[in-house]
Amino acid sequence: MNFNIALIRGDGIGPEVTDEAVNVLNAVGKAFGHSFTFRQALAGGAAIDALGAALPPETLAACRASDSVLLGAVGGWKWDVLPGDQRPETALLGLRKELGLYANIRPAILFSELAGACPLRPELIGGGLDIVIVRELTGGIYFGDKGTGQDGAETYAYDVERYSESEVRRIGISAFEMARKRGKRLTSVDKANVLESSRLWRRVITDLGEGYPDVELSHMYVDNAAMQLVRCPKQFDVIVTSNMFGDILSDEASMITGSIGMLPSASLAAGNFGMYEPIHGSAPDIAGQGKANPIASILSAGMMLRYTFGLLDEAAAVERAVKAVLAQGYRTPDMAGATPGGDITAVGTAEAGRLIAAAVAAQAGQP
Ligand code: NAD
């Protein structure tokens, strides 16, 4: 089968890690008899420099004409001087809104090979960790009414958190379906003791739960969830929460798994369309040095195979290839301290990508 992918390599380490994800996808194509056609498009700082806008219309058109989008990362010091509404990161909000990407899926998986990178005590994570956070991505306070004003001599500012029943219902369905395919436990995180929007959220999720009797639903306040994630992370299977709470909790969960360079994400629209990207940013401090970890980008491509293309065996092959390369002791510098005393070989971005692509090919018996 042929699949069309809009490729937004982005800024900083974005192009470096995305190129390795492309190499791995091409290895998947060769091993399983598919072809992937990549259509390059600009967003973020690269688009500001070349086309004068962080999210040019031709980029949106390229995304809409594709089956899915693979994004590196956007942003960097060079553009930090720009006003807020012109910065590279505005491209992300624009892509989410314009492409209707309302469900952000962030797995937080601790690979047993990297257990040493987890900052929690071993007994808290014994047997590994596998949590999925489903974050609402196009509503809530990040997209609500906002502004500043003057109250006498004092300046004030406000951001409005607003959710409709239908917004909560559609992310709730994504989360229940995800839980149904996994450990059948869903924790809905809100702040219903204080926020009206959270009370609506809790009511809609509770009602939805009646249609999923096989999924064990629980509710948790966000402050408690932040605490429980480090106190007893294994209690969680799938977490569903609002845009801002999800932003914060998913970064917290990512730290439990060691390096930010390991974690992929999917942002899904209705149907199978999705945008896939590592959770990390453009890492300007290491850009151009060939030492970024490409695994988050490669696993994002794996999520694309699973969620948009429905290629489950191919996705599993990518995940197995990553595990195999880690098990052989190869580490980019961010992971090098994760297995102290082990038989570790330090590798750069391109070599890590080549090894993972080769491990995919090896599964199909190809040299
Ligand atoms: P960051 O994720 O880019 O970097 C944080 C730290 O993690 C840095 O020390 C970096 O070197 C390291 N790191 C990140 N990815 C890594 C990888 N793959 N391998 C090894 N080390 C890695 O976060 P930041 O420094 O807060 O942001 C830098 C820029 O990226 C900013 O302009 C920010 O706005 C932007 N950003 C973009 C996205 C996105 O495009 N989705 C997300 C977050 C931040």
Image: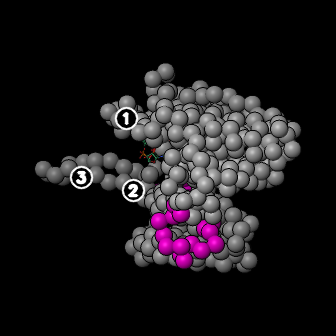
Image height check: is 258 above or below 221? above
Q: Check disc 3 and report its element: helix, strand or loop.
A: strand
Q: Residues within 10 Å of mark 2 (few under 14, many from 20)?
A: few
7 inside magenta stretch: no
Q: Tell me the tag on residue 77.
A: 1
Q: Which percent across, then down, holds residue 112?
A: 63, 64
Most extreme residue toward the left is: 153
* Stretch of the chain drawn in magenta: 116-140
Q: Is residue 199 left or right of residue 175?
A: left
**Residue wearing tag 3:** 156
Image height check: is 238 above or below 9? below
Marks 3 and 1: CB-CB under 8 Å? Answer: no
Q: Which percent across, then down, holds residue 240?
A: 57, 65
Nearer to us in this view, 293 or 311: 293
| Residue 190 visible, this angle | no
- Mark with earlier residue (3, 1): 1
Nearer to us in this view, 123 or 224: 123
Q: Check disc 1 and report its element: helix, strand or loop.
A: helix
Q: CA distance from mark 3 to mark 1?
A: 28 Å
Q: Check disc 2 and report its element: helix, strand or loop.
A: loop
Image height check: is 77 above or below 96? above
Q: Tell me the tag on residue 160.
A: 2
Residue at image coords 66%, 61%: 174
Judge: label 3 CB < 8 Å from ligand 1. Answer: no
Q: CA distance from mark 2 to mark 3?
A: 13 Å
Q: Is residue 290 left or right of residue 84?
A: right
Q: Amino acid at mark 3?
A: Tyr
Image-quadrant location for residue 30: top right
